[in-house]
Image (spheres, rainbow, N blue to C red):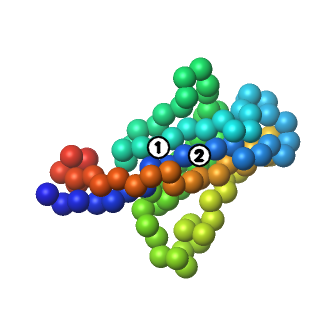
Amino acid sequence: MTEMRLYDLRVTVERIEGRSVCGLQVGDYFELTESSRIRIPEGRHFCIYALQSVLPLLPAKQRQLPESDWLEQDSLVCCPDPDERVVMRIERIGERTLHTEELT
């Protein structure tokens, strides 16, 4: 079996510099665990447009990158809506070992 190590991630609304039309609030978050499972706390939501802005970065943030890589150093992502200016932070919340044979 081939093993690989991936980080579990949490994406949290750090600040809102405009007005939140979508209803997100500072502190709202979702987690990406077990390689591909997105979890949003019960009773909460996460705006699909804010979500789409952060999704392309998550596979890279799940992996250990060279220290000099910009994505290893930066963790803030902005929603594409210029009126809202929702700023989200990607943080690593754990690390797990997965077997490549169990993944697609």
- Name the quadrant containing residue 46: top right
Q: Secondary structure at mark 1?
A: strand
User: Is 5 in front, or is 71?
Assistant: 5
Q: Quadrant of residue 1?
A: bottom left
Question: What is the secondary structure assignment of the residue under circle 2?
Answer: strand
Residue located 61% across and 25% down the image: 44
Residue type at tag 2: Val
Indicate the amino acid at tag 1: Leu
Which residue is label 1 attached to?
32
Looking at this rendering, what residue extends furthest in the left direction? Answer: 1
Judge by depth and name the residue closer to the eye, 24 or 51: 24
- Residue 83 makes an appearance in the image: no
Q: Is 17 placed above or below 66 here? A: above
Residue lying farthest to the bottom in this orientation = 68
Q: Does residue 73 appear to the left or right of 62 in the view shown?
A: right
* Residue 95, image x, y percentages: 40, 55
Q: Which mark is residue 11?
A: 2
